[in-house]
Amino acid sequence: MNPGQQIPRNALVWIILCLFTLVAPHAGRLPVWVLAVYLFAAAWRTMVYQGRWSFPGRLVKAGLTIASCVGIYLSYGSLIGLEPTIALLLTAFALKLIELHQRKDAYVLLFLGYFICITEFLFSQDLPMVAYALVNVILVTTALVALHRPGEHQFNRKTVRLASILVLQSLPLMLVLFFLFPRIGPLWTVPIKSHTARTGVSDFMRPGDISRLGKSDEVAFRVQFEGAIPPPSALYWRGLVFSRQEEGAWRSLRYYDIPPAERRQAPVATPGEPLSYRVIMEPTQQNWLYSLRYARSESPGVMSSADFLLFSPGVLEDERMYQVHSWPEAVLDPTLTDWRREMELRLPPGENPQALALARQLRAAAIDDAQLVDAVLAMFTEQSFGYTLEPPLLPMDNQVDAFLFDSRRGFCEHFASAFVTLMRAAGVPARVVAGYQGGEINPLNRTVIVHQFDAHAWAEVWLEGEGWVRVDPTAAVSPQRIEWGLEQAMQAEGTFLSDSPLSPLRYRGINWLNTLRLRYDDLTWRWQSWVVGFDRERQFQLLNTVFDGISARKFMLVLLASGLLVLGPVAFSLLWRARRRDTSEADRCYLLFCERLARAGVVREAGEPPGRFAARAAAQLREAGDEICRITGLYEQLAYAGDTSPQRQQAALLALRRAVRRFRSNPRTA
Amino acid sequence: MDGLSTTAGRGYRQRIRQRFSKWVNRRIPPSRVVTLDQRRIFIFPSRVGLFFAACLLVMLLTAINYQNNMSYALTFLLATLFIIATLHTYANLSGLTLRAVRAAAAFPGQQSEFVLQIERGDTREHFALHLKWPESTESLVNLVDEDCLRVHLHQAVGERGWFSPGRLLLESTYPLGLLRCWTWVDLDLRAMVYPRPLASPELPGLASDRPDGAAIPALGSDDFYGFRDYRDGDSLRQVHWKGLARGQAVQSKQYGAYASRSAWLDWEMFPGLGVEQRLSHLCYWALEFEGRGEEYGLRLPGVAIEPAAGERHRERVLQALALYGKAEPPS
């Protein structure tokens, strides 16, 4: 084999290392057997290196390829979708290692490695992930560099150093390209995530669903208000409206459930100054966007529904940023259409007879709808209802009856569900709203961090003249929940984040730890708003403010200038700084002299002593002979006679320099 | 690959090649010492680099289609890495000095050894320097700990005269393999090619042409020649014991009359033959005499080398034969 095609041992070690660091972030999403393939491939290639095994034959390779395709199909149930595609790619990546034979195989493998870094970003663009990917890029680059250092068999720190330098030198221009490169929409549809779990509030609600979310400390979204932050008790982040009840669950109306005439949002009067804020949502794999009522958004890809909610036509696969204006005082639906009224009053027939009876009883006692609402809330407050993160399980049938008259302990969804059932039974249009309530204010950047445990369900009742009015039955049972959040509400019970003992949120009492957490959250906010959320709009905004308007000429100018600014110093450091500085002044003069002689046709051979060279040159260039001998004499005196005084040396050097400078010889004068 | 190309196409290609080599000759004139600088170094994405560019395009499409900013960032990082690698690849060749050292003489068809020296004029490490002449063996060297390195390349030489291996290719794709940086240097390194030895059954016309009858080709065995005073190193078997016994000084017996056997290899010995054939025969006989350890001289038109023996003599004779009728190489 061509020596240039061989893979040095070092490169092989780096490649195998890369293989494992690249697959690591995917490990949680992959079937276990794929990871086994990695170990198997690494073991096989190591055996080949040691000369114990041989490279696989064509049949074995074909067999392995087919087996992995079948394996992926069996594990995922299909080969279409982002996760199976990536799993297939990662399996191929491991199998390619077994047939890593020549340098060109290594190139394929390592470039695939770069691509695998990108596939990691399709699942997470968080800071730790990005930092890890940068390490991976350096590792892959190190493997590439090691591939071009033939004959190096020991670990060499300089290989990693050079790769890191290369990557670091690339960063500035990368930033320029990142901010300047025009963001265009998707060119074609690509496989979407089909196997990634949906997170957050889902589009149906069974008793126990929200309390399950209450145990998660993950961030749902972050909000930054333009003005003052409203008190937490006013922060009801609406995400979904549940108007239908079927099979023991509350569901939202599907698009085709709604007659075309009802699909459009009724006009809403918007008096006064709105609240303005920016939301960055974590990926949920769902459509809805959270906002305070009544919300309007001009951000691209944000739509409004007839329930006065915001949603995105496509599911949120990545972080999503949108700008919202909200008018909390706006009257929603001052009049109800007949269809809407019918929908918001409908109850599953024959269920919860006791609750229905109770509702009739309360209806008879109340003067109007508002008083009825108060009566039900008073019932929750006065009777021994308990607010708990660990509600007892309810039977499948007559859940509201079981809750109201039997268990009497529940989380927000139990109260909201029971309240809406009672209202509907009493003839008041009502519905369940799901979303988040409250949030933690980060004093460092004035953002509101809404966690999964802030998930909440409450109710909206329709009152004549007031439209849809928010009623939160939980507030009647546990006012702390609304005022101070779940942690305070669960203090007595001790169930707040009891399943995640390592969550930093449990240690908010420790000051430095809390500051650290908030700082990191601030960093995440900036990262998401400036880098991850950098879209066409932001780009336009940025270029407009920085360059005062965008033109093609400016664009090119910036690109060129930044290119020169980066490449210039790099070239300088590479070519100039490394010049030999250890030659003495006398040596340099002599070398210049040799160069002049070479131009005259007498070239000094490698390692030829100056004396012999002078004799040869003098013989060829006769009339310059004396001068040649004089200069050589001066040089030899300087170079080899170390015992002379500095003054004399200085004088000799001066003479040598002058002589060399004056030395002119016509070529071929001999 | 060339199966489809027509002769016209080939001619066109040849013209391009000629024009190109003319251009290269102007740009990098032949010299025994060449220091590589921006005038002499060429750089272009390698095939691997083009493949990498295709990979970058796929990455960019992924970034666009998934609207994924970090994918954009990584794609741009790698694209910039490509650009930065240009400088590093260039720096790997820049400042190197190539120096012709020597080329061994050889017979036609034999491998000649071409020796050159590669030096660095800086303190940088240089890796994966790939050196070869168009037809020669190749060498892959690093300049890491040492400042200069001798490289030995072998190549089969052609016909009698001076053989030039052409332009030396020095290339490197270090550090990432994305770019190929190369230079073609004419180191003015020529190997002398002797005539092809061609046996002739006997040296014709020896007796008639050489009245002194000096060149008797037959290998007469050790004929006694005479005595001389014993010198250190003479074999004890050569000692004239009888004389010693008679009380004479220690003398050695001399055999193998070199002087009397000294032969002149003459151009005129092969009348009617072509130049190359004559030279080939002469070469054969020169080698033959050298092998026997006999003295021989050479007469060519305009050249006369007195009979002698030994390595240096052989070289002189062969050189004269090799260069007969050939111009001196331009220095």
Image (cartoon, rainbow, N blue to C red):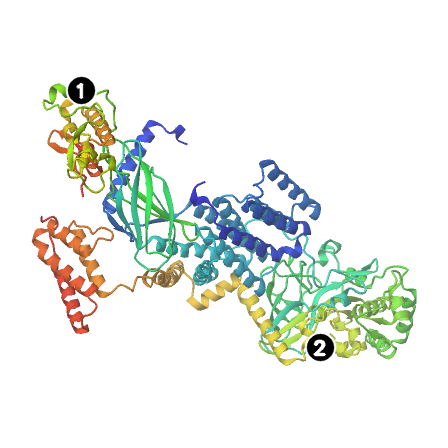
Quadrant hosting residue A660: bottom left
- Horizontal relation, residue A198 to residue A157: left or right: right
Q: Position of residue A511 (x, y in %)?
A: 63, 80
Total numbered labels = 2
Seen from the viewer's position, the closer of residues A53 and A92 is A53
Q: Which residue is mark 1?
A: B204
Residue A189 visible to the viewer: no
Furthest-left residue in view? A623
Q: Residue at x 29, y 64 (%)?
A: A582
At 82% from the left and 63% from the top, the residue drawn is A345
Which of these two is toward me, B274 or B16?
B274
Q: Do marks 2 and 1 share a chain?
A: no
Examine the rendered structure and indicate whether residue B76 appears above or below residue B139.
below
**Residue at the image position 88 percent from the left and 59 percent from the top:** A349
Residue B101 versus residue A516 in the image, above or below? above
Which of these two is toward me, A309 or A197?
Answer: A197
Q: Amino acid at mark 1?
A: Pro
Q: Judging from the image, what secondary structure is the residue with disc 2 in?
A: helix
Provide residue A384's location: percent of width, then percent of height: 87, 77
To which residue does mark 2 refer?
Answer: A233
The residue at the point 67 percent across, 46 percent down is A72
Image quarter where the N terminus of chain A lies is: top left
- CA gap, disc 2 to disc 1? 124 Å
Residue A297 in the figure: left or right of residue B17: right
Residue A138: where, in percent of width, then height? Answer: 50, 58
Q: Residue A668 in the image: x percent, y percent?
A: 11, 48
Taking B151 as reference, is A269 above or below it? Answer: below
Chain letter of disc 2 in the image:
A
Report if the CB atoms under discs 2 and 1 are less than 8 Å apart: no
